[in-house]
Amino acid sequence: MKLSKKAEYAMRALLAMARDPETSTFGIQDIATREKIPLKFLEQILLNLKNGGLLRSKRGVGGGYQFQKAPARITLREIITLIDGPFEPIACANAEKRSAGCDCGIPGGCGLGQAFAQLRQQVDDWMANISLAQVLERERRDTVSFDI
């Protein structure tokens, strides 16, 4: 199971913005250069994040993107779901799809679907409990320990 490059870039772009609390507006070109993200791809990603309510845009001179929500209130689940949709390791890990009938034909789903439903819930819960601010805190803590 692997996240899409688009989801990875979305998280990296938001983290780049969150690392610089002194700046309130971020230009797309600056983020693209700093994070080595293709500009056209980043434009699409930031538009998705804006439409999802995580960012807002400012037009004109000095324009760019700003946080709509504080980094402490933005979870990894929220970012990944906006970009990739909900985490579903296999189709019948979703309770609705399992009750509608899996490919296996077992009413209520097979043991495999049930096992992956449990994994789906654990991953979803974990992502919902990790904010951008917490990711940055981990980064700072690890950077400090390496500098000693």
Image (spheres, rainbow, N blue to C red):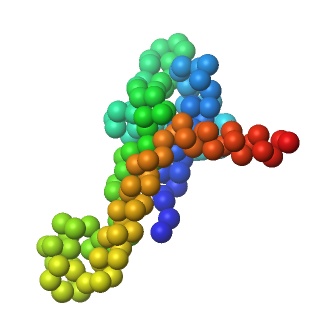
Give the percent coordinates (x, y) of residue 71: 49, 33
Front-most of residues 143 and 35: 143
Q: Is residue 14 left or right of residue 30?
A: left
Q: Quadrant of the C terminus?
A: top right
Give the percent coordinates (x, y) of residue 142: 72, 46
Q: Is residue 11 visible?
A: yes
Front-most of residues 27 and 82: 82
**Is 133 situated above or below 80?**
above
Q: Residue furthest bottom?
A: 105
Q: Is residue 14 left or right of residue 125?
A: right
**Is 54 situated above or below 142?**
above
Q: Residue at x 66, y 43 (%)?
A: 139
Q: Residue at x 76, y 40 (%)?
A: 144
Name the quadrant containing residue 126.
bottom left
Name the quadrant containing residue 32.
top right
**Is 117 situated above or below 107?**
above
